[in-house]
Image: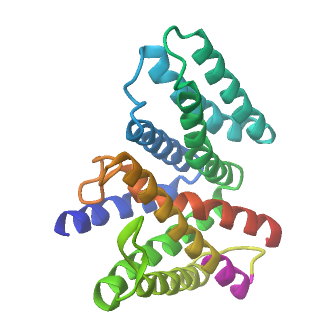
Amino acid sequence: MFTRIMTAVVMAPLVIALLWLMPGTAGVALVGLAALVAFDEFLRMDGLGGAGGFLARTLPHLCMLGLLATTIVAPGFLIGTLFLSLAVLLVRRMAAAGDFKDWIARVALPVVGLVWIGMPMALLAQTLYVFPEVGRNLTLGLFAIVWLGDTLAYFGGRTLGRHKLYPAVSPKKTVEGGIFGLLGSVLGGYISFRWLPLPGLGLYQFLGLALLCGVAEQVGDFAESMAKRAANLKDSGSILPGHGGMMDRIDGLLFAIPVLYFGWMLLG
């Protein structure tokens, strides 16, 4: 617990300061780095990170870089870049010698990672790059929604948790913790709205988005827990002491980003 808290105490102010001072440059760089690290953890989780030669190991990461770059250079071609990545991975697999019985899994898993991790992070990078000030405030607001939701879910579950929420995937999570998590997300949304300028959004609109983000965050948490259980892993990695891997830290964020992004686009 002490290591977990100290990591948060050191990392959270650093991330917030970089986003506040340099939302465009530093924000995009942070998002890109986090996406690449989480994507690498995802591939290693499924035994593909170190498989094959140099090209086989690096090609999926190059596809991820291409996806992130497209959202900055030509955001309208984001879906096209995803399909191009699929084509590149298919051609690479067809050109490889050997047994092809696992070719669907070896092509599909990186594509799943590109959609699961790359698409939300690309949307976040695009928001920070195209609308630096508003993107910064939305990103910090999203952090508050997800982090407070995660924190209250943890302590609410520890103190009052009685009824299991989804024991087949995450035995320790409880209904009570989930409810506290949603309350924490709404609280994070309220604090964000009061402290950060969010043009185009009213208080109740943003609180509604915060609640939906809280639901999405918990779904994302369960999704990653299911992936780790399938891979027989406790954590996705060890880059963040006390927290595990990068994907362990941003699992809920990945599902909450599209909710806030498209909600803001529709309502803002």
Residue 135 occupies quadrant: bottom right
Q: Position of residue 130 (x, y in %)?
A: 71, 50
**Could one spot residue 20 in this view of the protein?**
no
Query: Depth check: 94 or 131 in front?
Result: 94
Residue at figure coordinates x 46%, y 41% from the top left: 33
Total label count? 0
Q: Residue, x 41% and y 67% (percent of image)?
A: 168
**Vertical placement of 112 versus 250: above or below?**
above
**Image position, residue 122 (x, y; %):** 63, 46
**Is 165 placed above or below 255 here?**
below
Residue 189 horizontal/vertical position (percent): 58, 80
| Side (left or right) of 252 relative to 82 | left
- Picture quarter with the C terminus: bottom right
Side of 252 relative to 243 (left or right) = right
Left/right of residue 154 with respect to residue 258 in the rendered view: left
Judged by its main secondary structure, the magenta piece is helix
| In the image, farthest residue toward the bottom | 160
In the image, 153 versus 72, the foreground residue is 153
Residue lying at 56% horizontally and 75% vertically, measured from the top left:
214
The foreground one among 158 and 261 is 158
Residue, far front: 101
Q: The magenta stretch spans which residues?
A: 202-210
State whether residue 54 is above or below residue 266: above
| Side of 144 where 111 appears, left or right | right
Residue 262 appearing in the image? yes
x then y, percent, for residue 224: 46, 56
- Tell me the quarter of the image containing the N terminus: bottom left
